[in-house]
Amino acid sequence: MANQEWNDVYDENRQRTGRVHLRGTPWAPGEYGLVVCVWVYDGAGHILLTRRAKGKSFHGTWENSGGAAKAGETSRQAIARELFEETGIRASEEEFEFLSSDRDKNTFYDHYCLRRQISLKRIVLLPGETDAVMWAGYGKIHWMIRTKKICRIIAAQFRRQESELKKRNVAKVHC
């Protein structure tokens, strides 16, 4: 089956076990996968958001780019691939700035940010994954969270990382 996706299995200490897991099947207790996420910002106070396509969980809600690392991929390889697949934005692994990691029941999450000034016309959306794109300022993102246009998982992630993003991504005031 060519369309099956396999992911590395990590232990609770984030060490690869040498086993792989078929995406979409249940994880065993003590097994973890790796998911990567990136906040693309323009340096002028805006964050790039994409909308989840019909047929996906949380379809119609907005999010940052990201996804599961495939078997054999490092975290940085996975985020470079995911961002390109979902938006057409190319970036080298070294360009991604690491923000934080966290873990839930069966997943390690690595969060990155990337500065890119790019026209929305140059964004290439992945059919079946994303169906719209926008640049949004912090006020609009907070409104989108309040009105549930951003799913709760991404909203919680944004709240945890907003202060770090603002340090890097503030509009310059011209006097």
Image (tube, rainbow, N blue to C red):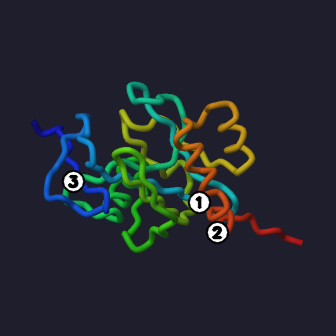
Q: Which quarter of the rendered picture does the N terminus lie within? A: top left
Which of the two discs, 3 and 1, labels the residue nearer the N terminus? 3
In-image side of 22 versus 54 (left or right)? left
| Residue nearest the observer in this picture, 133 or 36 | 36
Q: Are marks 3 and 1 in contact (CB under 8 Å)?
A: no
Q: Nearer the viewer, mark 2 or mark 3?
A: 3
The amino acid sitting under disc 1 is Tyr
Which of the two discs, 2 and 3, labels the residue nearer the N terminus? 3
Classify mark 1: helix, strand or loop: strand
Residue at mark 2: 168
Disc 2 crowd rating (10 Å Cα; few below 14, some 14-19, many 20+) is some
- Disc 3 to disc 1, C-alpha distance: 29 Å
Classify mark 3: helix, strand or loop: strand
The residue sitting at 52% across, 41% down in the picture is 153
Q: Provide residue 124's location: percent of width, then percent of height.
A: 42, 47
Residue at mark 1: 41
The amino acid sitting under disc 2 is Arg
| Residue nearest the observer in this picture, 42 or 145 | 145
Q: Are marks 2 and 1 in contact (CB under 8 Å)?
A: yes
